[in-house]
Amino acid sequence: MIEKFKTLNFVKSSIVFLYLALTLPIPFVSSNELKIISVVMFLLGLYVMINITNDYVETCNKKISFKTTYLSKVLGKQSWEIFWKDIKSIKSFTTSQGSKVHYFVTKKNESFLVPQRIENFSKFISMISKETNLKVDGISYLSPLWTYKLLTFLSISMIIGEILTLFI
């Protein structure tokens, strides 16, 4: 049975709302000559932000696949696929912010980043454990979920402030 794990909604919303907070005023404050191009670029950027947050993971009893959108591929993010039987270990590294990232290491010594910003993460981790028989105790979300919620809240607050400033 194929399981699909989409990007967390909190991650998507934080990226999209931050983009809106940073760029929404531009079409309103641009000169008349640049108004059309600024609106077009704003909408194009919004499309890009929404599109690149639609990556997802698919699993079945034979393999795990990370699927990216066409636009993500154009921007350099590649899809990948690994058979469960080919995963020999999971390596962990501490980031400069104190979080941990984890990589699947295959029998050919290829490394693939373990997706850590997906829905149903505990189910995903259970599936990794079941299919690979590897220890997964230390694997968690890359950042605490409250950070995405806070970024979304702050971004929405900025948007409200910008709207109030522009129209009042």
Image: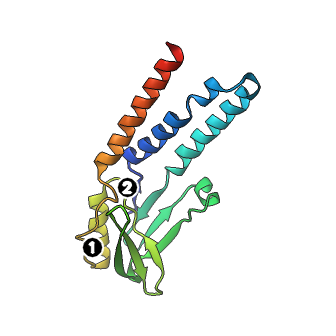
Q: Amino acid at mark 1?
A: Lys
Q: Residues within 10 Å of mark 1 (few under 14, many from 20)?
A: some
- Front residue of this view, candidates 124 and 23: 23
The residue sitting at 46% across, 18% down in the picture is 164
The residue sitting at 66% across, 30% down in the picture is 39
Q: Going by the picture, which residue comes out furthest to the top?
A: 168
Percent coordinates x, y for residue 13 in the rendering:
42, 41
- Foreground disc of the pair 1, 2: 2
- Front residue of this view, candidates 87 and 24: 24
Percent coordinates x, y for residue 66 in the rendering:
47, 64
Query: Residue 153, relative to residue 30: is it above or below?
Result: below
For residue 86, what is the image quadrant?
Answer: bottom left
Which residue is the site of mark 1? 130
| Left or right position of 113 against 51 | left
Contact between marks 1 and 2 (CB within 8 A): the answer is no
Q: Amino acid at mark 2?
A: Ile
Q: Going by the picture, which residue comes out furthest to the bottom?
A: 108
Percent coordinates x, y for residue 111 in the rendering:
46, 77
Query: Residue 9, relative to residue 58: is it above or below?
Result: above
SS at badge 1: helix
The residue sitting at 44% across, 24% down in the picture is 161
| Left or right position of 32 against 68 | right
Which residue is the site of mark 2? 118
Percent coordinates x, y for residue 100 in the rendering:
33, 67
